[in-house]
Image (tube, grey):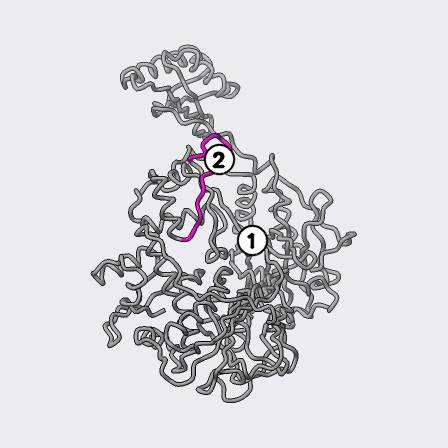
């Protein structure tokens, strides 16, 4: 967004006089200054706005952010009083329309009214100036207040308005197109009895456009579902200022205010007839839980801990209030009522503020993140790895040991890509968790299987002349449950293809087979301290079974529960990728079923580290057959003048009649033991061992 600094100063007079200082404040608030220009219109900055903040796309929104830093409230611009018009008939037939209303007024005759020069310049900066005052007033409201409004020629409307989904085969003569444009079915549109007059939240049509002869205006102001607007803008390839605002979530409190502001500006700039009506009619829309009032508890002690500093509660209240939040003190349930604030979320932040962490970010930006001390978080002494972590490590260890490479694939794929699997129409694999409005159609489905991307990897490697492939991935698969829910499954999958052993002139190569994969899986389960069973037929077969060779695959079971399958991929499926290999082997299992609390992956006990390092010494003795190292260690502990923490055998050397044991002795240390004392203790221990066991053939080496 390109912003005229002189106009911004009118909304925020507290700005520093230095342009450089203004840019620094904007940057500190997260509004990145991409460019500063000296133009004939004055100083202009190009801002990179925060991606999820629709309220930043206007002068009032930017001024409000600055007001939070300066602790100055930002009032809304003046609006005209509008009388309620009970005769206005607007019907909303889609849940994508969250609020809708229209204002009516009449223009004065003559061409005396004109747009103030400063606003003409501001609209030109963002290519929004049209030269028709009513249209430009609507653009000013959007750029000033952040509420997009659309101005229709009321005399060109036929009958009442209706907000509805577009029907199959409908077209609209959009404002920027010389010919009618097909409107995809299902897009939200505003229509009268003759057809579409606007694509909701995106663009109006030429039939009801304002012209030089327009006298009666109908000012449309609404709030639409962000996803529906984004879908329409992408389908029509039109990213308008209104669409940019609505895609990020509009402010329900500005629907009427936007229309009232447009009427006020028309009157202020001399465009309204003296006897002009100033009416407002509003449609009844379905309630949406996303617009419900929201209050978030903010614990000031937790806030202090989060940033490692101490905030002034009054300053926190002031700055949040200047950002538009309502702040009340409430009891946090532990008697510390003055340390817990109840923060009400304003309309312009309903789409991005949901929890205390969101408020932490707002407070951090208002103070400036660089103003906080740089502190490392407080941590304990660490913890042993969990059984889940140990199981995953054990699986990785086995697979890497067999020469597998770990890969990372996307969590999404396209419907076109999935069709390559050629699954039957009634297969569960045809059902997906689908993104309603994916930015890229290649990533519109959450994956419900990993075989598709595994085959893509094999294809890519063969294109690079790789003759053998072994790879695995820990990933998640998504299964739809009903219409609005899904299940997420942790999965380990692996694939092998090519030759296990390369051919030679005497012997041809040997390819991988089912038994190779079975051995890998059995060893993996054993390494996890678990077991895995293989069974051809089960009561609830995996949907993936229809993609496997009918006689060369088996289900995997852990404790009689089906957790996956393994075997050869069906040649029909492999043929769709044109892979040059005899067979492709694949396994897929819920690896969390291998997690055990005991066995090979049980956590070793964690011992506290001593305050001072142990004092260690080594000594080696030849022990004859029949004398154990345990007997020697017992005598060492019994005779030592210093307390021993432990005694370990660290080496054993055997050659002929020689059996040399190296013992490591660790003496406890309270930081008062000298080296002479340790050496004396070693002399005492060595002498005692030789005196006690010398007759049995013990000697020092």
Task: Give the image location of residue 473, x and y in percent.
Answer: 55, 55
Q: Quadrant of residue 145?
A: bottom left
In this orientation, does residue 84 appear?
A: yes
Q: Which residue is drawn at 61% across and 38% down?
A: 596
Q: Quick check: 319 above or below 103?
A: above
Name the residue tied to disc 1. Answer: 292
Side (left or right) of 456 relative to 151: right
Side (left or right) of 318 relative to 512: left
**Residue 334 among magenta residues:** yes
Task: Give the image location of residue 236, x and y in percent.
Answer: 53, 78
Q: Residue at x 72, y 60 (%)?
A: 545
Q: Quadrant of residue 310?
A: top left
Q: Quick check: 198 above or below 473?
A: below
Crowding at dot 2, Cα within 10 Å, few <14 / some 14-19 / many 20+, comes out as: some
Closest to the observer, 444 or 632: 444
Task: Give the image location of residue 603, x and y in percent.
Answer: 53, 34
Asked if disc 1 and disc 2 are in contact, CB closer than 8 Å, the reply is no
In this orientation, does residue 617 appear?
A: no
Q: Residue furthest left?
A: 18
Closest to the observer, 551 or 547: 547
Quadrant showing the N terminus: bottom left
Instruction: For mark 1, give the secondary structure.
Output: loop
- Magenta-drawn stretch, dominant element (helix, strand or loop): loop
Instruction: For mark 2, give the secondary structure.
Output: loop
Residue 331's disc number: 2
Q: Tell me how many marks there are.
A: 2
Task: Give the image location of residue 138, x and y in percent.
Answer: 44, 73
Crowding at dot 1, Cα within 10 Å, few <14 / some 14-19 / many 20+, comes out as: few
Q: Give the range drawn in magenta.
A: 324-338
Closest to the observer, 139 or 404: 139
């Amino acid at each position: 967004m390109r912003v005229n600094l002189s106009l911004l100063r009118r909304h925020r007079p507290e700005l520093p006089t230095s342009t450089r200082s203004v840019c620094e404040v904007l940057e500190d608030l997260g509004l990145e200054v991409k460019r500063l220009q000296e133009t004939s219109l004055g100083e202009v900055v190009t801002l990179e706005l925060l991606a999820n903040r629709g309220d930043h796309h206007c002068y009032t929104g930017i001024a409000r952010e600055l007001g939070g830093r300066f602790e100055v409230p930002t009032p809304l611009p003046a609006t005209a009083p509008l009388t309620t018009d009970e005769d206005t008939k607007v019907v909303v037939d889609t849940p994508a329309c969250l609020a809708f209303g229209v204002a009516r007024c009449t223009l004065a005759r003559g061409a005396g009214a004109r747009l103030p020069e400063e606003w003409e310049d501001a609209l030109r900066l963002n290519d929004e100036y049209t030269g028709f005052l009513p249209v430009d007033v609507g653009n000013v409201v959007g750029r000033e207040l952040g509420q997009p409004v659309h101005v229709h020629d009321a005399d060109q409307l036929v009958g009442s308005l209706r907000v509805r989904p577009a029907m199959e085969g409908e077209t609209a003569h959009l404002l920027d197109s010389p010919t009618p444009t097909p409107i995809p079915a299902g897009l939200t549109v505003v229509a009268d009895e003759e057809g579409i007059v606007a694509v909701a939240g995106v663009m109006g049509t030429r039939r009801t456009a304002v012209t030089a002869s327009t006298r009666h205006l109908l000012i449309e102001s609404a709030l639409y579902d962000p996803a529906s607007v984004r879908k329409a803008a992408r389908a029509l390839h039109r990213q308008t200022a209104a669409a940019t605002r609505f895609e990020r979530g509009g402010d329900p409190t500005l629907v009427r205010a936007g229309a009232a502001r447009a009427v006020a500006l028309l009157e202020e700039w001399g465009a309204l007839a003296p006897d002009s009506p100033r009416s407002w009619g509003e449609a009844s829309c379905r309630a949406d839980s996303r617009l419900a009032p929201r209050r978030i508890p903010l614990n000031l002690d937790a806030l202090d801990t989060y940033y490692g500093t101490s905030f002034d509660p009054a300053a926190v209240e002031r700055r949040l209030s200047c950002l538009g939040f309502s702040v009340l003190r409430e009891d946090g349930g532990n008697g510390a009522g003055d340390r817990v604030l109840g923060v009400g979320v304003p309309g312009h932040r309903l789409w991005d503020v949901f929890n205390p962490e969101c408020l932490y970010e707002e407070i951090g930006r208002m103070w400036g993140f660089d103003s906080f001390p740089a502190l490392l978080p407080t941590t304990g002494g660490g913890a042993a790895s969990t059984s889940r972590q140990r199981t995953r490590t054990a699986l990785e260890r086995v697979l890497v040991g067999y020469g597998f490479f770990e890969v990372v694939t996307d969590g999404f794929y396209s419907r076109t890509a999935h069709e390559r699997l050629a699954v039957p129409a009634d297969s569960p694999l045809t059902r997906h968790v689908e993104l309603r409005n994916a930015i890229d159609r290649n990533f519109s489905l959450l994956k419900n299987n990993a075989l598709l991307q595994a085959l893509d990897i094999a294809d890519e490697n063969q294109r690079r002349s790789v003759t053998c492939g072994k790879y695995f991935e820990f990933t998640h698969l998504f299964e739809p449950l009903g219409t609005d829910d899904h299940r997420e499954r942790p999965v380990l999958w692996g694939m092998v293809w090519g030759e296990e052993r390369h051919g030679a002139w005497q012997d041809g190569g040997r390819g991988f087979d089912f038994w190779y994969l079975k051995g890998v899986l059995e060893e993996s389960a054993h390494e996890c301290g678990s077991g895995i069973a293989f069974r051809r037929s089960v009561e609830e077969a995996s949907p993936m079974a229809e993609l496997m060779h009918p006689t060369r695959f088996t289900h995997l079971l852990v404790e009689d529960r089906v957790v996956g399958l393994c075997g050869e991929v069906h040649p029909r499926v492999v043929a769709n990728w044109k892979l040059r290999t005899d067979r492709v082997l694949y396994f897929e299992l819920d690896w969390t079923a291998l997690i055990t609390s005991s066995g090979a992956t049980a956590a070793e006990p964690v011992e506290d580290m001593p305050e001072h390092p142990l004092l260690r010494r080594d000594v080696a003795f030849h022990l004859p057959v029949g004398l154990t190292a345990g007997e020697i260690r017992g005598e060492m502990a019994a005779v030592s003048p210093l307390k021993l923490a432990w005694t370990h055998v660290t080496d054993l050397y055997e050659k002929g009649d020689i059996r040399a044991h190296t013992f490591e002795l660790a003496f406890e240390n309270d930081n008062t033991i000298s080296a002479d004392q340790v050496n004396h203790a070693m002399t005492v221990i060595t002498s005692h061992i030789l005196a006690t066991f010398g007759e049995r053939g013990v000697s020092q080496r």
